[in-house]
Amino acid sequence: MSFRFLCLVASITLLASCTINRNVMFKTDQDYVYDNPPADSVGKEYRLAANDMITFQLYTNEGAMILDFTTNTESGRQQGLTFREFVYMIDSEGFIELPTIGKVNVSGYTLFEAQEMLEGMYENQFNFPYALIQVINRRVIVFRGSGADAQVVPMTNNNISVVEALALAGGLSARANASKVKLIRKVAGNQEVYLMDLSTIEGIRYANMTVQAGDIIYVEPVPEIASEVLKDVAPFVTIISGFAFIYAIFNRGL
């Protein structure tokens, strides 16, 4: 009876092991070849891309009106309250359509380069134009290493590093494996995967790598085999133990 009971428990344990760590994502084989991060990935300026949503503001006289908005006069406060921002989306081909000048290709430009280009386009219509562009929908997805916990981090700054994105998401979880941090990025239509070891000080060269909009930072969780096996097997062991107890009582009665 004891031998059969142990065999039954062992069989249930093997079946339950099939569900262990099934929440782990983006698994790679032992011989998987990771991509090499770009050499200029640290401090690299963000470049506009398709599907970016931007705000565009244009001022005359080299932006003198902006200073008027910051004054404490009543007229300055009224102007600031009535000023409106307009949102534009860059289409799949990298174009935005702006008032009076029509479609403009801004894909691949940094914010500073795009502002200078648009200022030149508006020179014939306005005196000393001053353009301001801001991307409002940039974000990076961070999995903190718990296997299921994730957070979408908005990129409010132009140059957010990997370690800053992790900090904004709340840091690594208790189950995170800092030596296996994967950065997944779409480059020229292909997915590239960079493996970073942030468990040692040498990993600072990866930690300072600038993230881009749409990046996925996945911290691989440490497998929890023993606890998950016990969690899966416990209900079955309880049921079997109950039946075994009842069976033993009936045998004594007989």
Image (cartoon, helix red, strand yellow):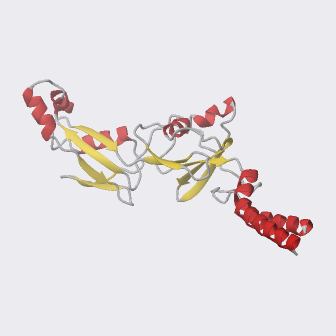
Quarter residue 117 falls in: top left
Quadrant in the picture for the C terminus: bottom right
Q: Which residue is located at x 65 percent, y 37 percent? A: 198
Q: How many marks?
A: 0
Establish if 197 lies above or below 66. below
Residue 136 position in % (x across, y down):
35, 46
Residue 108 position in % (x across, y down):
42, 48
Establish if 198 lies above or below 16. above
Q: Farthest bottom residue?
A: 254
Q: Which residue is located at x 70 percent, y 56 percent? A: 231
Residue 242 position in % (x across, y down):
76, 66
Which of the pair 118/140 is nearer the observer? Answer: 140
Q: Which residue is located at x 32 percent, y 48 percent? A: 54
Which of the pair 35/78 is nearer the observer? Answer: 78
- Asked if residue 210 lies left or right of residue 114, the reply is right
Quadrant in the picture for the N terminus: bottom right
